[in-house]
Amino acid sequence: MMNHSTASKPADQGLLARKAGLPAKDAKLSMAHMYVAFISLLIGGLMGLLQVLVRTGKMTLPFGIDYYQVLTVHGVILALVLTTFFIIGFQYALMSKTVGMSDGERKWAWISFYVMLIGTVVTAVMILLGKANVLYTFYAPLQAHPLFYIGLALVVVGSWIAVFVNLHQFFKWKKQHRGEVSPLLAFMVAINMIIWFISTLGVAATVVIQLIPWSLGLVDEINVLVSRTLFWYFGHPLVYFWLLPAYMAWYAIIPKIIGGKIFSDSLARLAFIMFLLFSIPVGFHHQLLEPGIDPFWKYIQVVLTFAVAIPSLLTAFSMFATFESAGRAKGYTGLFGFMRGLPWKDVRFFAPFVGMLAFVPAGAGGLINASHQLNQVVHNTIWVTGHFHLTLATTVILTFFGISYWLIPVLTGRKLNAHINRLGIIQTIVWSIGMFIMSGAMHIAGLLGAPRRSSYSEYGGSEQAMEWIGYQYAQAIGGSILFIGILLMVYIFVYMTFFAPKGQEEFPMAETAEDALPTPMVFENWKLWIGLAVALILFAYTIPFIDIIQNSPPGSPPFKWPIGYN
Amino acid sequence: MHLHRYEKIWIIFGTGALLAFLIILGIGAFYQGSQPPSCMVTIDPQNVQAHEAFKEENLGLNQVGENEYVVNILASAFNYDLGKDENGAPVKTIRIPAGAKVTFQATTSDVIHGFELAGTNVNMMLEPGYISEYETTMDNPGTYTLICNEYCGTGHHLMYATVEVYEE
Ligand SMILES: [Cu+2]
């Protein structure tokens, strides 16, 4: 893939695209999502840079821009917009490649895209007007402009259309191939979209039933704890919705890139089914320090949270088994000698591999956060920010970048050349260094008590705060390095979209190892798995949720002035 | 489904470790009573003064036993109300003797706030309509900053108070 041949004539492109990767129409659809994702990366990254600089105490924002406005943009555009658009665009490419897309499905996919885009723009305008400084968690009774919530609701509804398109593609294939095991990547997309649909029901409920009527003044008060509980019912599976596309690439794409095979198709499916079962009934681990929720049910959800670590352990095993068999097949021996057989100079492997490494401390940190009592030490400190900058902003995002190095050329009918490959490796290293410094400083400062989501403050000259500020300098250094990484990545994206040599980039999809045993058909029993997932949710939430409603205090009126919105 | 031998070992080891963690957390929670703050007492968020603890005169430090204190705090954007001193000025610092048993009892009269005594395990969410409570022993002398660690608006980072633990 490194030596590009001479550029082909544009007339060949349609044919090439079909042979190599995707039908041109599907490529266009997927690419539309990528534009939104990478524009979001640039804007969100710039906001991140402003935050770390403000937090040194040496810089103030111009034009009366508020720190929390910048923070709201950063969170909404990176955690909600970038992720959702990249994932949905990537999943269309996977589905088109494995099970195909009909004209009708494509039409709905475009409707989904525009509904989400309109929602994003409406939300963004409200944030930019300073009428929605509520951060991306928008906890009531802080109240933003109704259009902020309506925009968010449109994004969710648009994403549901994408869910139905993907599931329609998947189940149509199954109907046409009775008794066959579905393509692994299509199976994974179906699982991820089912998780997304079940979990977004919660956030949609609080936005549509509670927040929108309340922000329109149709009702006077809001039940705060119900709203938060519905939000966090969505908030944790949300992180798995980010993580699973990375796992798709790890399980089914990386093996091809390193010249190996999928270690076990069954194990991959088992891991994804476990995510379907355990990623949703765990929201209370974000609410451990809240009044009004019985600690017994908090503990039950802590147990379920730990269960969701098991499929990640399976994944770690599968990855290293794949690396080892690929290395040994190339003739490398010794306990760790197989590592030399891996394509370290291929950015399509190198970037996601660094992402995997980051998941070791990230996963361990996650267990700490979910530990019933240990959470007390780190809750809402900047440790948590450090944590999800390792999981989302390193593991997931480096894997997404790793995907982009081949996906964007596939979509644009170009080739990943040596220039971009080299830049991509530099980008990965820059990102790792920046994140090591920033996330490391956040973790340490958090253990010392420094709060998250806070502008620069000396807290009345407190000695403790003075200690934190040193780490804020480190965060500014790390954050600035990361911003260089973002500029590099945006350059790479633009280059791959418009300037890379024309040609036929490979769409890497791995096959299962010959000696792997056949996949048990029980994995295709969708009624069973969805039924079990729903049963676990009902078990974990029914009683505490009824408790919350029955013991509700009087509701809360709206508060706009604290966010500077009058 | 067939599993490789090493894979079985890995899963048994991994799941075993997770189980061990959970058992430790469970013993801590249910046998030793170390549960996260989960006070179930509700209150009218628009009339918190109706509750004895949050009446103007009861805010701040209250000695309730020989070495036992209750601290009542009313949070609002962007302030922790700890009552008034003899001169009528708002109290910003609370002084507690080392080794005292202290119960922090707090609520909010407006939006959600955090309640974190940096450098200690005192950390809880304050939500409108609920009282949050945490009982602890302040063993180590020192100056601790009480900070709001949940976003509550544009003055969120200006919301703090001080707790001094002094040696007797
Ligand atoms: Cu506050």
Image (spheres, coloured by chain):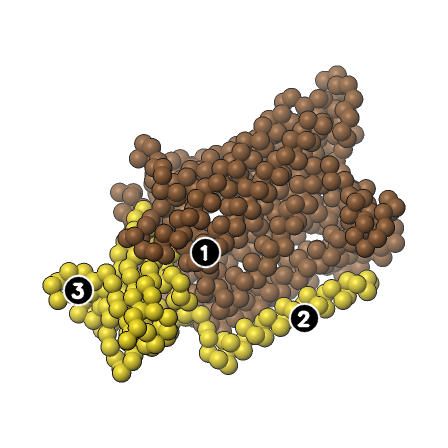
* Relative horizontal placement of residue A526, taking residue B35 as reference (left or right): right
Whether residue A292 is visible, yes or no, is: no
Q: Considering depth in this image, is B130 or B35 the residue closer to the camera?
A: B35
Q: Quadrant of residue A55?
A: top left
**Farthest residue in the bottom direction?**
B66
Within-10-Å neighbours for mark 1: few <14, some 14–19, many 20+: many
Asked if disc 1 and disc 2 are in contact, CB closer than 8 Å, the reply is no
**Which comes before the other along the chain, label 3 or label 2?**
2
Count of numbered tags: 3
Instruction: Residue at 70% x, 34% y: name it.
Output: A406
- Residue at 57% x, 50% y is A391
Query: Residue at the location (68% across, 26% down)?
Result: A419
For marks 1 and 2, give the one nearer the viewer. 1
Chain B tint in image: yellow
Question: What color does chain A have in the rendering?
Answer: brown
Residue that mark 3 sits on: B84
> Spatial distance from mark 1 to mark 3, Cα to Cα?
32 Å
Residue B16 disc label: 2
**Cα distance, mark 1 to mark 2?**
29 Å
